[in-house]
Image (cartoon, grey):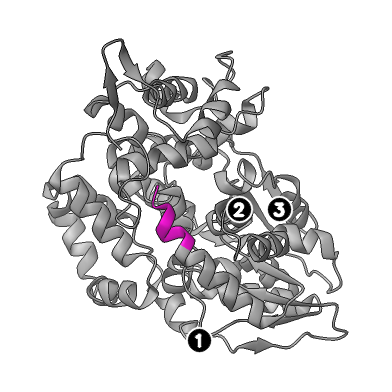
Amino acid sequence: MAVQESGQGPVPIEGFDELRSLASDCVHCGFCLPACPTYQLWGEEMDSPRGRIHLITQILDGAEGGAATTDHLDRCLGCMACVTACPSGVRYDRLIEAARGWTEKDPERPAAGPTLPPRSARERALRAAIFRLFPYPRRLRVAIAPLRAAQRTRLDALINRSGLPDRLPPEIASALRLAPQRPAASRRARGTLPERVPARGTRRATVGMLTGCVQRVFFPQVNAATARVLAAEGCDVIVPAGQGCCGALSLHGGRRAEAVRFARQTIETFERAAVDAVVVNVAGCGSAMKEYRELLADDPAWSERAAAMAAKVRDLSEFLAELGPAAPRHPLEMTAAYHAACHLAHAQRITAQPRALLAAIPGLRLADIADGGTCCGSAGIYNLVQPEAARELGERKATAVAATGADLLVSANPGCSMQIASALAARGTPMPMAHIAEVLDASLRGVRAPEFRASLG
């Protein structure tokens, strides 16, 4: 919708009273400033949460946004650290998701919101490619086949030494740097999980498991470990074969109608599974699925179903903490640094459970990461569309991780794992990376620390 003009200046855009109400909750106190990664980088008010809220309010009140407005909105990582820091409870998540819809111009909702200047043709093409690729595991597998071939033949190392990536467009160079370097582990776990993994011992629950998109393609060993951990703790694990994308990338990227379509498909899939809970091992996916209630609140045919599904969603750490341990843990003598993914710590407010699960493993020592609540720069597709800012944040995080002297970095989000691993490698301090499911699985199976580290590549 174009901005309306009158003889007395801009006219507020109709139909956005809820967003205005949410924006008015901000009292501009500034508590969000030190928590915001982009404000830390540039010290620019319009690249802070309260600055972006001011821009959003101006647009809702009829002001005409320019290219700079789009830039400031695009530079937000959506890490939600500001939501945790805000004493007024401002729903910045709702505001930035709506504003991203104005800049993204969702092709399925072309008139949903104010009109902002279009991005460059290059930026539009990049985003279109991302959203046509990443939510579709089959397409993603085909796309990365040449990369996997280069890794198996060590051609990727030769390309890196040649300096070619530095001469490529930054978005492509960033994608190459982020690619996981664990094809061997992926080959061992490439097989599709069965649709049912039976509980070991007494059955305590029946759970569905989301396999994800990026997780399924790049980190299938994490899904396999997740299923083994759940089964060891007495859960029948249902892995629906027909599941697709949960809609997280689309929702957080401003493509709301696309996210709704993915959400409906996911709801139907897990309704058929008839499970007690839906366990998710990707922080961003879990955050989006818990938002289904709000995403479909205005749809009479889906609102109750969405609310029921959202109530069943549990992060793996959250679910295991609620269930309580049953299987014995075996020693894992090593030091691990735990990286709290933003959509786990800030969006879902799950902070204590992952640490408690790791601390309960005999012999495992936890090392604190300085400024651990700051985003690593991954943030969904951020490290592909804002590569320079993401690189700087990744370097900061890698420096903090390396300073822990840990043997292992543990995370609960594939994007974070790829981002930090790339930054650690770039600074010459590579470190094995593992999902919390892999660490728990190693302990439950009695794998010794040297063998576990060797399996991580």
Residue for point 55% across, 15% down? 30
The residues tagged by marks 1 and 2 sit, at their Cα atoms, a distance apart of 34 Å
Q: Is residue 408 visible?
A: no
- x, y percent for residue 27: 59, 15
Residue for point 52% across, 77% down? 243
Label 3 vs label 1, nearer the camera: 1
Q: Residue 101: name its quadrant.
A: top left
Residue type, label 3: Pro
- Please state the extent of the stretch shown in magenta in the rendering: 254-260
- x, y percent for residue 364: 72, 56
Residue type, label 2: Ala
Residue for point 62% across, 65% down? 280
The residues tagged by marks 3 and 1 sit, at their Cα atoms, a distance apart of 27 Å
**Quadrant in which the N terminus appears:** top left
Q: Which residue is mark 2?
A: 297
| First in sequence: mark 1 vs mark 2 | 1
Q: Which residue is mark 1?
A: 192
Residue 25 belongs to magenta span: no
Q: Which residue is mark 3?
A: 354
> For numbered disc 2, what is the local secondary structure?
loop
